[in-house]
Amino acid sequence: MQNLLRFIRMYNVLIIFLLLQGYSINLYLNNNTFQNNILIEKTSNYTGKVYDFSNNIKEYFQLKNINNQLMSENSKLNNLYSKNKINYLSDEKDFNYLSAKVINNSIYKRNNYLTINKGKKHGIKDGMGVISTNGVIGIVHSTSENYALIISILNKQSAISICLKKQNNYGSLKWNGFNYREANVESIPNHVKITLGDTIITNGYSTIFPSEINIGTIKSYNTNNKTGNQDIIIDLFTDFNNIKYVYIVKSQNSREQLKLELLNND
């Protein structure tokens, strides 16, 4: 203990300088999205290797639990194929799906990300959608050769186009930044009649996600006369604290659709 105090007294100026420098860099990156995105993209390959190594060690000591989860995932997939419950694994002919393992995941930050063990050499590109057997996970933010960083829907920069399954009204999915089991739905007008428990799904208008992928159910709603839209909170189907495997959505005709839309956007 005395040696530690002696060390702090000897190098107190250097320690304070390093702490202030680190705090300054953190403030700079948090308030400059462009620089922050560049840093994330440049370091994703190195951090991916660290997360992969750490994840392998954890899995070694959790083999029994992992095997049980794999059996559960296989059972879910078999049910999806046989009973045709979810569109994106059966009827959507325009989409392909690549499985990947989650090697790092955050849920308690204001901006949360996931890291998966697939990257450029596996055909993954920025902007691709990511789903699980329970619903929407997020969108590919950046890739390295062997890894990809996913911007989770639990992120203030995330905005997913959604649809009320019963009423067929469109809105946007946002995250309030507090509870990883909840999210907010915006842009649903006050006059739209909704009920507790109504299902929220993807609308399929973009090239990122197929239509009718589950997102969550309405937990509460209130009219907002200032905005003209309802304040809606939903319970997410996906437990983001327990994600092991995901599927990257690859649209076969996305380039053709985007090109046509850009040509007619003048």
Image (tube, helix red, strand yellow):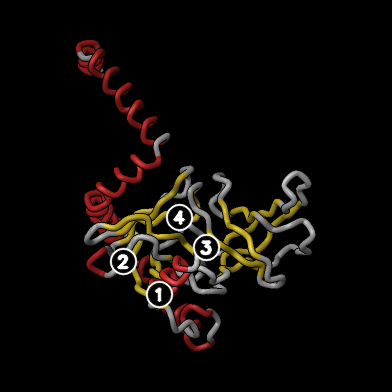
Quick check: 139 left or right of 216? left
What residue sits right under mark 4 in the picture?
A: 152
Residue 18 visible somewhere in the drawing: yes
Check residue 131 in the rendering and tell me which mark sits there, or answer none: none
Q: CA distance from mark 3 to mark 2?
A: 22 Å
Q: Nearer the viewer, mark 1 or mark 3?
A: 1
Q: Give the residue at x 26% y 69%.
A: 122
The disc labelled 1 sits on which kind of residue?
Glu
Pick whichever of labels 1 and 2 is earlier in the sequence.
Answer: 2
Callout 3 amino acid: Thr
**Front tag of 3 and 4:** 4
Check disc 3 and report the residue beneath it: 238
Distance Cα–Cα, label 1 vs label 3: 31 Å
N-terminal label among 3 and 2: 2
Residue designated by label 1: 256
Q: Earlier in the sequence, mark 1 or mark 3?
A: 3
Label number found at residue 124: 2
From the image, state whether disc 2 or disc 4 is nearer to you.
Answer: 2
Give neighbour class at mark 1: few <14, some 14-19, many 20+ (Cα, 10 Å): few
- Between disc 1 and disc 4, the foreground one is 1
| Residue 156 in the image: above or below residue 122 | above
Callout 1 touching callout 4 (CB < 8 Å): no
Q: Residue at x 48, y 78 (%)?
A: 88
C-alpha separation, residue under disc 2 versus residue under disc 4: 16 Å
Would you call the spot at circle 2 few (<14 residues within 10 Å), some (14-19), or many (20 or more)? many
Q: Determine the residue positioned at 39% across, 36% down.
A: 32
Q: Are marks 3 and 4 in contact (CB under 8 Å)?
A: no
